[in-house]
Image (cartoon, rainbow, N blue to C red):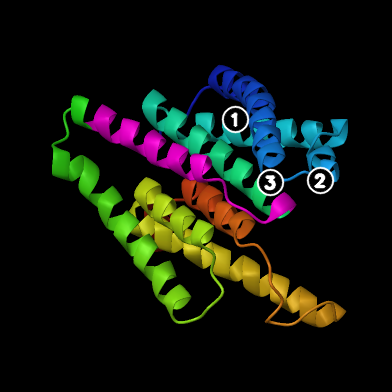
Amino acid sequence: MEVGSLAEVFYGSLLGLLSALAFQRITVFQIERRTKESSKVEAINTPMAIALWMLVSAILYGIFFYIETETIVRLQYVLIMSIAINISVVDIDIRRIPNESVLALFLVRTIGIIADIVGGQNFLEAALPSFIGLAVGFIIYSVPSMAGVPIGAGDIKYCAAIGFCLGIYGFLEASIIMSIALFTYWIYLKATGKGTAKTVTMQGPYLSLGVMVALIFPYEKIVELLAK
């Protein structure tokens, strides 16, 4: 399997540091627009929070620049990852998923589809998996919402965007990871007596975790490893 060089990993990590600073400022702006509570902004504007964001971003960018060698794929993955972190932080802080971040995911993947077509793929080959993933993501999370399950509109739109970016199999993998993370959190609540299965919790961070795992360990590689 072809991987990126150490120099490319270094450049990727450096890009991750700079990207974290940019996305941190974007996140602060998004939160300031949605709440008047200064404590919400201060929580993510401390030197420790910024340093942690930069560290995580640098590590993840380095990983993506190592496991992927195509420039357009690298850029798609790191941007999707950065947006996923952005969505997680906003959702944790003020329990909302910014529409502009969801739209940014659609834009990133649309540019990727255009690049694939320019690179020689036909339209259906390049775009159909994304549109199927979008439909599946939207339907799977819309039906429970219509049945009374407390799933916010932001979560539904985020799931549709994830399906569009990752395709149906990537979306299902991300959903499984999210479910495992939520179940682990439920066990923690039960064990500590801090809540029950009805305890309301934001889903954005768990969805974002699923996205990151699906990008780093895509189902194709997992199937390949299991087949050996």
Nearest to the observer: residue 198 or residue 35: 35
- Say what secondary structure mark 3 lies in: helix
Q: Position of residue 192 (x, y in %)?
A: 86, 78
The question of residue 119 being in magenta is answered with no
- Residue 224 visible, this angle: no
Q: In the picture provided, is 47 more to the left or to the right than 204?
A: right
Q: Position of residue 190 (x, y in %)?
A: 78, 82
Report the residue marked by disc 2.
37
Q: Residue at x 69, y 25 (%)?
A: 21
* Cα–Cα gap, marks 3 and 1: 21 Å
Q: In the picture provided, is 171 more to the left or to the right than 209?
A: left
Name which of mark 3 and mark 1 comes first in the sequence: 1
Please say if the residues under marks 3 and 1 sit with CB atoms less than 8 Å apart: no
Q: In the picture provided, is 111 more to the left or to the right than 95?
A: left
Please say if the residues under marks 3 and 2 sit with CB atoms less than 8 Å apart: no
* Cα–Cα gap, marks 3 and 2: 16 Å
Residue type marked 2: Glu
From the image, which quarter does the C terminus lie in?
Answer: bottom left
Residue type marked 1: Gly
Tell me the mark number nearer the camera, choosing from 2 and 1. Answer: 2
Tell me the mark number nearer the camera, choosing from 3 and 2. Answer: 2
Report the residue marked by disc 1.
62
- Residue 7 visible, this angle: yes
Name which of mark 2 and mark 1 comes first in the sequence: 2
Q: Give, as a single range, the part of the protein colored magenta.
A: 93-116
- Say what secondary structure mark 1 lies in: helix
Report the residue marked by disc 3.
89
Q: Position of residue 29 (x, y in %)?
A: 67, 33
10 Å crowding of disc 3: few (<14), some (14-19), many (20+): many
* Cα–Cα gap, marks 2 and 1: 35 Å
